Amino acid sequence: MAEKGVMPHESTECDASSAGVALDSLFPLPFTPFEYYYLLEDRPEYASTFPVRLQSRGMLDRAAFSQAFTLTVQRHPFLMARIEYDRRDWPRWAAGDPPPIHWAKLPADPHASAFSRAACSGLQMTIGQAGDLIDWEFVFHHVAVDGLGAFQFIMDLFLAYDHLSLGSAGPLPWRKVDAARLRDRDGHQLFKQRLRLKDLFRLLRVTLPLNVQKAAIVSNHDHDPTTGEPSHAPDDLVHHLSEHETSELSRIAAVHSVMLHDLLLRDYFLTLDEWNRGTTEARRPIRILVPTNLRRREDYRMPAANVFSFTFLSRRARDCRDRAALLDSIQDEMAEIKRQKRGLYFEAGLRIFCIWPALLRWSLSRPWPFATAIFSNLGAGLDNVPLPLHNGLRVCGDLAFEGGSGAAPVRPDTRVSLAIHTYAGRMAICVRCDPRSFHRDQRRALLDAYVQQLRTTIETES
């Protein structure tokens, strides 16, 4: 899943042709190194997919929604594209067909939570209904899109449905998109610039520890993974903070003159440090992967794509003993990450490894993970959709959205992924744990430990 980012919305009205280029002239398109990385990481037991789950109440007009879905997916070619290979055996995108909608009764079949990108489009969608309650499950493949691109698609979809279900006149109220920009989706790359000595130093500083220094693994406290649920079992748990708790955390961040993102990340380090204390993993550094957006200003007219990279923050147990000092250090490092555009250096490392794809495959088969855990802050995802408000909830046609959740995929030994969503004044904390390593009670205990850490912050730092 992706770090917080907002798609600029323009009120310009346009129709489905606003993608600006015919698909037969757009494809084929060669993979970027980051897309290739996610393709290599895709495996049956650890699919490179991420869900976005929404809940709403109201009556759904299926005919209007099906039409909205067809029109919207045509604006985002990578959600339809299939994978083929060129003569050098390098993957590339080719034109494909729109994915189907799976209609289900609640509780919905969780089959869509893991699918192979090699066989399917970049999106699977399941709609589960029971009376006026509707569960929406969008499962996106990271090869095709990042979290920001996913919300770009969702925004367009519900704007189209709102327009069509209400029988509104005129063209659909979509912002302009230019599919031709997909050809330059990795135009941000570091190697298009003149490399300086400090760039090479930063490149080594980012990539070397990932391949030579073993990060801590979130301990399962000697749980036997063979006694856990099957690997396909749903593994996301969600806790909703109250409006008071949400506003208090924002206020405390302001008091400390730090970003709320940094405060939430600090408490994640504290939670993982306490969780691992007394285990063999406690002697290794905790390394948290934080997705970072590489889009340039002109890229925000691009359809949904994967234009993110990774940054990593590492702290040892001794660094987590002083809450204030830890927060200050995270604030300083996050500011440095943004100033140096450090995500470019991880992407540049992948680009070098892709010169010899076997080298990248070797790197991904190393006996330790890139990161201990993953942290994503999606901010106000649903609140960014320019739909009417009623009683504090976004309304689309006859539907009122009550909330949403989702988290980035876990990897072998990167066992925990935590994502923050804020909607209607409340923060939702979604934790995805590897069910092969943790049973459900442990997953709940880990989520509860993070919630308690946030409450400690509210009680002691206000």
Image (cartoon, rainbow, N blue to C red):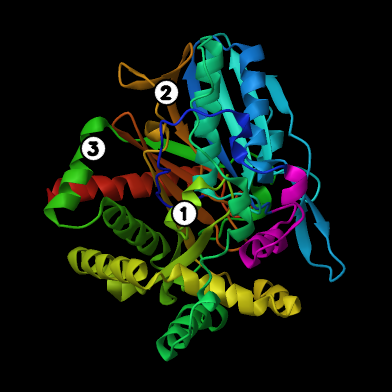
Is residue 254 visible in this depiction of the protein? yes
Of label 3 and label 2, which has the lower sequence position? Answer: 3
- The residue wearing badge 3 is 245
Is residue 219 visible in this depiction of the protein? no
Amino acid of disc 2: Glu
* Residue 350 % position (x, y): 61, 73
Mark 3 Cα shell of 10 Å, populated few (<14), some (14-19), many (≥20): some
Of residues 130 and 177, the one nearer the viewer is 177
> Residue placed at 43% from the left, 49% from the top?
446
The magenta region covers 23-45
What is the C-alpha distance between the residues marked 3 and 2?
Answer: 18 Å
Give the mark toward the camera: 3 or 1.
Answer: 1
Horizontally, residue 187 falls left or right of residue 450, namely right
- The residue wearing badge 2 is 402
Amino acid of disc 3: Glu
What is the C-alpha distance between the residues marked 3 and 1?
Answer: 37 Å
- The residue wearing badge 1 is 298
Q: Is residue 42 magenta?
A: yes
Label 3: which secondary element: helix
Give the vertical position of 309 relative to 315 (above or below).
above
> Residue placed at 50% from the left, 53% from the top?
299
Label 1: which secondary element: helix
